[in-house]
Image (spheres, rainbow, N blue to C red):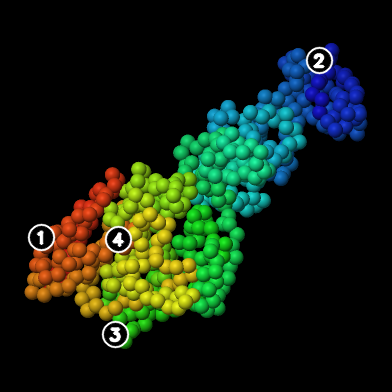
Amino acid sequence: MNRNRPPHPAGHGAPHEMSSIAISGEPSAEVSVVGGWMGHSSLAHTWFQRDQQHRTLALVVSDSKGNAMDFEITLRVDGSEHRLTVDTRTTLLDALRERLRIGTAKKGCDHGQCGACTVLLEGRRAVSCLALAVAYDGADIVTADGLGNGELHPVQRSFITHDAFQCGYCTPGQVVSAVGMLQEAAAGWPSVVSQDLNAEDVTLDGTEIRERMSGNLCRCAAYANIVPAIEDGGAMREFRYDRATDVSSAVGTIAGSPNGAFLAAGTNLVDHMRLGIATPELLVDIRQLTSDQITELPDGGIRIGAAVRNSDLAADRRIRRNYPMVSEAILSGASGQLRNVATTGGNLLQRTRCVYFQDLTTPCNKRQPGSGCSALEGYNRDHAILGASDHCVATHPSDMAVAMVALDAQVRTQRPDGERTIPLTDLHRLPGDRPDRDTVLTRGELITAVDIPPLSFATNSRYRKVRDRASYAFALVSLAAALHVTDGTVQDVRLALGGVAHKPWRATRAEDLLRGAPAIEDSFRAAAEAELAESRPLPGNAFKVPLARNVMVRMLLDLVEEQS
């Protein structure tokens, strides 16, 4: 619409007539302009623009010199049309927040530098604090509220999944900017860090995302999670789902699918799929294929089906009576909700909780071989002191596996070429130069059961876990121990440490030293120190060495007392 206005009228009684004022898109339309003073003020005058049908097009307030001050405009915001009168100095951000009470776009710096006010303006991301509302009469505007058509947009879901915010003030602008940026990338727009300006497709890696989102600041510095949230886009990648009818067909299917995976409870796998760590193209559901029963073996041992849920295993009377360390280990791990669905087989195969493994923006040899290990020079409080390598210092997270390793459990598996049995002590690997391989299992090999052999003195066993929180936290150091003492002498002992290595750490050196030794503190301390003699702590976890020693000594003293 032509914003030129008639001069200030000589009087305020009779209207002033004009014709042939152009309207955008209709240059030949005839419009009458009727003007008059606003009250009796000499400072402002009111002008009504009307078309030939006498419909009001705009209410305009001018100053005493005839310069327009207020305009009636229309904004389409999040799918709804709003007519409002704004001062010419009103920014689009203020119109949204103060006039329309749409507070999603935030006022941060008010100079276009922080990005908190980002909206989609005619489909493109823009800062609304530097846009005059009158210049966008009739514009289509989308705020964070309007992204999902009544539901959360995938990017909004991804920000929640990745915990990509703290105070949340800048989050609406971050989300809207990310949506707009993804559209730009999909259209093939390059950035200053793009390797090939003429490339047809854009690969959005961490470097590209950081550059393209540089107009959005986060005061809480949640960038480490914002980048993977945008990479993920809020939705898991599509995958095929297959519900196998028997173990053999499931094994054969995954053996022939380089990017396939077995799905049991999925408590670890689905989490990694949501984070973008795991991107299987095929999931084969095996929940109904393996046994969910706990049965006694002829030699007095116990067979635990791979589908036995953690809560059922911990609550089983035979386990609680004969192998209390197993019950205690399971009960000290995860929450009740997770234990009610997590399976025995899945528990053994859960992956590390190293913060860098779960952060797609950082180098991690376990996640991306050859990229480097960020923990070596970074945060390493939770990491390994035994058996690590220059390629990886991650630890294995399972509590149950530690107890089962101490008990010499055997893992039964099914492969395409038949069954095999693997000592649990050999199931998990040390990292070496291939930290991406957690176990010795081959492609398509499926755990079907775990056998725990009879061990009479396992009734005198315990599991102790030291962690940063009293509950629902992974071990800094844990110990599974069983002890048999006769006449003050150690007859036999089983020890396994958790939280200190890439795999549950069987303390065989300490066991060998203790058999036949006096069951006293000096013996226990000497054995613990011998086991930890080759530890290689990092700057952030040197405390684990004395902590592990003290836990071993205290636990063995307690078991001596309990047996007596």
| One can see residue 19 in this view | yes
Query: How busy is the neighbourhood of tag 3: few (under 14 within 10 Å), some, or many (20 plus)?
Result: few
| Residue identified by numbered label 3 | 299
| Residue identified by numbered label 4 | 498
Q: Is residue 512 above or below residue 472?
A: below
Residue 290 picture location, percent across and down = 46, 77
In the image, farthest residue toward the top: 10
| One can see residue 315 in this view | no
Location of residue 481 (image quadrant): bottom left
Could you tell me which residue is drawn at 50 percent across and 77 percent down?
247
Could you tell me which residue is drawn at 66 percent across and 29 percent down?
131
| Residue identified by numbered label 2 | 8
First reached walking from the N terminus: tag 3 or tag 2: 2
Could you tell me which residue is drawn at 17 percent across and 67 percent down?
512
**Residue 563 or residue 270, whichever sits in front:** 270
Query: How busy is the neighbourhood of tag 1: few (under 14 within 10 Å), some, or many (20 plus)?
Result: few
**Residue 16 or residue 240, whichever sits in front:** 240
Mark 4 secondary-structure assignment: strand
Location of residue 339 (image quadrant): bottom left
| Residue identified by numbered label 1 | 522
Tag 4 and tag 2, C-beta contact below 8 Å? no
Residue 418 picture location, percent across and down = 45, 78
Q: In 3D space, how far apart are the residues under numbered discs 2 and 1 (Cα atoms)? A: 103 Å
Q: Amino acid at mark 3?
A: Asp
